[in-house]
Image (tube, helix red, strand yellow):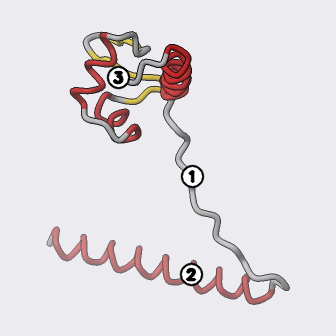
Amino acid sequence: MLVRRAQMVMKAAVDDLAGLAEEGLRIAARLKEPVQVVPKVEPERRYISTKELAKRLSISSVTVHRLRKEGLPDVRIGYRVLFDYERVALWVEERNKERKRSGNRE
């Protein structure tokens, strides 16, 4: 009984969606310009994990931990260590400038 009811609800939902799709196509056909579908863009998160930072910088998580000891800016939220990618990028850029000035190529 319950399975039959679920099947009926699913069929009604599919029929409703089919009707909406047909209506959308009729409306689009009446438009003079073609309809463009704009993909949904996820907003970039402000803080990212060690794993995500390592992936973005193409380095290992171990290297991220070593760089933290050298001053890589991080944010602690509870026990989690997160990174603001913009601050990290500025830090890396400044660090590279300092290394070039001093001639240190570690």
Tag 1 and tag 2, C-beta contact below 8 Å: no
* Left or right for 22, reference 55: right
Residue 12 coordinates in the image, percent (x, y): 40, 77
Q: Which residue is at 25% across, 76% downward?
A: 7
Residue 106 coordinates in the image, percent (x, y): 35, 23
Q: Nearer the viewer, mark 1 or mark 2?
A: 1
Earlier residue among tags 1 and 2: 2
Which mark, residue 21?
2
Three-letter code, disc 1: Val
Q: Residues within 10 Å of mark 2 (few under 14, many from 20)?
A: few
> Which residue carries the number 3 mark?
106
Earlier residue among tags 3 and 1: 1
Answer above or below: position of 39 versus 19: above
Q: Which residue is at 82% across, 82% downward?
A: 33
Q: Which residue is at 24% across, 70% downward?
A: 6
- The secondary structure type at the circle numbered 1 is loop
* Left or right for 26, reference 8: right
Q: CA distance from mark 1 to mark 2?
A: 23 Å
Three-letter code, disc 2: Ala
> Which residue carries the number 1 mark?
41
Single out the residue that lies furthest toward the front.
Answer: 103
Earlier residue among tags 2 and 3: 2
Q: Quadrant of residue 20?
A: bottom right
